[in-house]
Amino acid sequence: MGRVRAVVVGAGGIAGAWFPPLLKEDVEIAAVVDLNREAARRRVEEYAPSAEATTDLSTALASHAPDFVVDLTVPEAHCEVTCTALEAGCHVIGEKPMASRMDEARQMVRASERTGKLYMVSQSRRWNPAHEQVRRVVAEGALGTVTTVNCDFYIGAHFGGFRDEMPSPLILDMAIHHFDLARYMTGEDATHVYAREFAPAGSWYRGDAAASCVFEMTHGVVFTYRGSWCAEGCHTSWNGDWRIVGERGTVVYERDQEPRGQVVAGDEGFHRPLQDLRVPEPRLQYDGMHGALREMLEFLRGGAVPQTECHDNIRSLAMVFGAIESSRRAERVPIEE
Ligand SMILES: NC(=O)c1ccc[n+]([C@@H]2O[C@H](COP(=O)([O-])OP(=O)(O)OC[C@H]3O[C@@H](n4cnc5c(N)ncnc54)[C@H](O)[C@@H]3O)[C@@H](O)[C@H]2O)c1
């Protein structure tokens, strides 16, 4: 396969994180599309001077026939942009969250099936070396059977822009990362959730920027998530602070420090004797969006289907909408298939 060609849609904040890996991988950027032509023009000037800057997606797809489209628009636009690209015969890599409604996400999965084109979500935090280390600790059985997963996320983030207006900014725009990581680290899927979203006093968001959620996962795992995007002081990591407990030990991953843990080393005593957990060496070479992009490029060259292909990623999105529904009904609810 020769040089791969892409059209980038959405030239806002996150586009600044996508152009460097696209250029590093020698992807030809044929066009940058944004409803705001000036935003598209600025990104073209900055990163891809020979690309077209336009507001017209369909015409750009028809005239440049890209191999894939990078959808970096706001969540409400993902369904329309991604379906337009799939129907035009392009593969798509899109920003999280997959969609702002579950019915839209299902429509996107159906469009991928109907057109036979790949749609993957860049759930970028999967491609973090420490997260992959935690995943291997669990998968290699060092903790025994996993029973309990906790994640805390507390950050005071003053964004301005679309997040300030969303009904569920924390759950839909941020916790999607943590919910997906819980699936990634444990290999389990959520079956039910009880959640309470809320707006803490003093919140600067229009919607609920805090939540507490208890997920029941397959094989009896309980995943408890506590988070807030309007918590001033003593911030956790953006990746969240994690504790995973198994029958024989615990791994802790906090403040982006190396994961660490302890496992049982004997059968006697009030506290059983413990030894340090052996955490495997990091092995991911490409971080964040670059890691996601590499999986798309490998797929285009005949490689494996990326791990966050839409049929997988919709299960993380279902946790988001399950939590929102549970909070709305004040009831434990099943997570949609
Ligand atoms: N992976 C991460 O860590 C991460 C971090 C930040 C943002 N994001 C995600 O990236 C996406 C974009 O976020 P952002 O911060 O860049 O937002 P932004 O508001 O800065 O930029 C979005 C851009 O999309 C354009 N746009 C909206 N609808 C469009 C349409 N139909 N066609 C063409 N252009 C359209 C807007 O004009 C704007 O320029 C969101 O889904 C967000 O959740 C991911």
Image (spheres, rainbow, N blue to C red):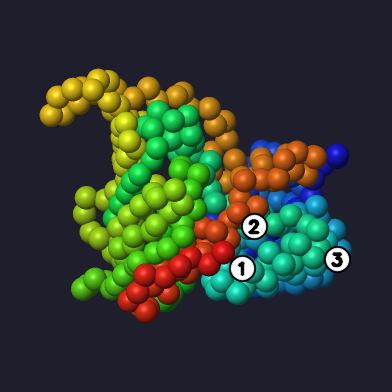
Residue 238 visible to the viewer: no
Q: Position of residue 239 (x, y in %)?
A: 39, 47
Residue at 36% from the left image edge and 52% from the top image edge: 223
Q: SS class of the residue under badge 2?
A: helix
Residue at 33% from the left image edge and 25% from the top image edge: 277
Q: Which residue is mark 2?
A: 310
What is the number of the mark on residue 62? Answer: 3
> Which of the pair 191/136 is nearer the observer?
191
Q: Is residue 118 left or right of residue 329?
A: right
Q: Position of residue 199 (x, y in %)?
A: 28, 73
Taking 71 as reference, is 102 above or below it?
below
Amino acid type of disc 2?
Answer: Cys
Taking 284 as reference, is 306 above or below it?
below
Q: SS class of the residue under badge 3?
A: helix
- In terms of sequence position, does the residue under pointer 3 or pointer 2 come before the other? 3
Amino acid type of disc 1?
Answer: Ala
State the quadrant of the N terminus.
top right
Contact (Cβ within 8 Å) of mark 1 with mark 2: yes
| Number of other residues with Cα within 10 Å of mark 2, as a class: few under 14, some 14 to 19, many 20 or more | many
Q: Which residue is mark 1?
A: 105
